Amino acid sequence: MKTIHQRLVLLICLTTITKLCLAQVPDTVLLNGKILTVDTQFSIAEALAIKGDRILAVGNSSEIAALAGDRTREINLQGATVIPGLIDNHFHFLRAVQRWHRQPRLDGVNSRVQALTILADKAAEFPAGEWLLTQGGWYPEQFADSPGGFTLEELDLVSPENPLFLQERYNLVYANTLALEAIGLDPADGALHPAQGLATFQPPYGSLVQQIAPTSAEQLEKNLTDFMLTLNSSGLTALYSLGRGPEGEDSVLENRAAAGPLPLRIWNTLAYEANDSSSADAAAQLITSNTPNTFDGDNGTFGLGEHIYLPFFDFPSQNGPWPADVMDGLMKIASAAAQGGWHIHEHTMSNWSIQDLLGRFERMNEAIPMNHLRWTLAHVYDITPDSIARAKNLGMTLAVHGVAMNGGVRIPFRDIAESEIIFGLGTDSTVVSHYQPFITLGWAVSGLDIAGNKALDQTLSREEALIAHTRNNAYMFFQEENLGTLEPGKYADLVVLDHDYMTIPAEEIFWIKPTMTMVGGRIVFEQE
């Protein structure tokens, strides 16, 4: 016969075991699917279980179903493919939020007829006289049925009562009669004009943008919510937001993040501008006095970029070394970053610029080791195998972006992939590029643009491209233990697809649509 002490011990043990068992009952299970875990073996499973904001288990449907309790939500995938949440490593997020409600977006639209319909539908939503703008995200060659920019007649037809202009990257702008007359330009000269002075991406923004009424605080909050939902619906669950300061008011994001979990994980850059040697000194001091990577799993400041020193503003046309004084100013900031443990994400389009940076970084690395910082060279349009090897030797990563598709740039994807350097995919949205990750994936795998034109000589396999948009990007942000794959213990960030990414024809990857997106086990988008 057990003593009272033994009975109490047994009761405590049984209670503890019961609590442990209950703790393992999932909140949600996804069954009967094709789950691309994107782990190191690129394993494929049928089902997974979610507890709280993390993945509890991955396996076959019978194993996962057996874990479910009375209160477990069961989602029958009915054979649908599931991938990890997609991460964009280079995104101008705040820029889009400022005027999102006024924008008829043409990102990923490959039909001129459809584009004109989108413009007309947006104009119909607004009272006469209200301004509309498409702040980039499109390029004239994307319309397979009729390539080219817009005529004055077309823009007047789709928006007869509202001033309307469309910015093409940073170079050109197309405007209707009402918009042109408002700033004193003669419509007889046509719709197309240089963007300089009319529509730029930072203050003073240009005369066309200045005609638009300031966005109210309430509208900014709604824009933020709507824009995040749009990105969730495209399959994005996390992004790196660059360009704080001149690109838009960031308090709206900070306030929203403080109110509760975001539907999108966002890394931010430290806000500063360095234009000369003196401001480079100030920036170095700011970097030294701040803490790197305050990302809390939801939002926070991560690193520096994409122009850590503005005089080093690279273009593909760079055809020689940079002046020593420019590189000296840049290295003031880079040295402070290395000493303070900051990540750098630097805009580099030409191999000349990449070589200049690598030479300086290699010398700095002898005194201040940087191999553990995972610094990123972004864009890398014409990077050579030698530069790739040197970057890899410094522990650096590469960020490649879908904007290259729009400019006819032939990224050397095979050279990059076969070097085994860690590289990630992104867009460079929202002005110069689309925001949809499946367009980037489609381009990287098929080698085509959305109009069906050849855009690459070297392509990636489907596995390589998906890894680059998930697992590798997580590594870039020091989140490989939390994000990027669908494995037990990681955040339950995932996307359910309407087509199988692994079997759909490569040229149709562009048009894959999410039917559901989860962030931390929460459904943040579901197709109606």
Image (cartoon, rainbow, N blue to C red):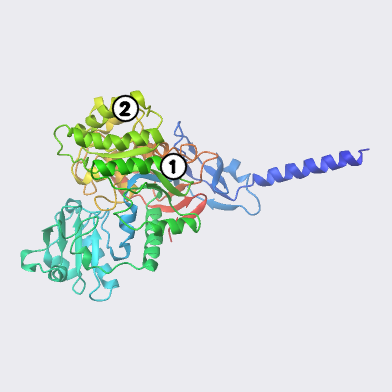
Q: Residue furthest left?
A: 188
Which picture quadrant has residue 1? top right
Q: Is residue 181 shown left or right of residue 277?
A: left
Residue at 47% in and 47% down: 493
Q: Residue furthest right?
A: 1
Q: Amino acid at mark 1?
A: Thr
Q: Amino acid at mark 2?
A: Met
Residue at 28% in and 28% down: 388
At mark 2, the secondary structure is helix
Q: Nearer the viewer, residue 39 or 70?
A: 39
CA neighbours of label 1 inside 10 A, class few (<14), some (14 to 19), many (20+): some
Q: Is residue 179 above or below residue 227?
A: below
CA neighbours of label 2 inside 10 A, class few (<14), some (14 to 19), many (20+): some
Residue 407, horizontal then vertical, whole percent: 19, 45
Residue 485 seen in the figure: yes
Which picture quadrant has residue 116? bottom left
Q: How many numbered dots are placed on residues in this image?
A: 2
Q: Residue furthest top?
A: 366
Q: Nearer the viewer, residue 255 or 34?
A: 255
Residue at 18% in and 42% down: 408
Which picture quadrant has residue 122? bottom left
Q: Is residue 164 above or below residue 330?
A: below
Label 2: which residue?
364
Residue 477, horizontal then vertical, whole percent: 41, 39
Residue 173, horizontal then vertical, whole percent: 16, 58
Label 1: which residue?
291
Residue 172, horizontal then vertical, whole percent: 15, 55
At mark 1, the secondary structure is loop
Q: Residue furthest bottom?
A: 128
Residue 441 seen in the figure: no
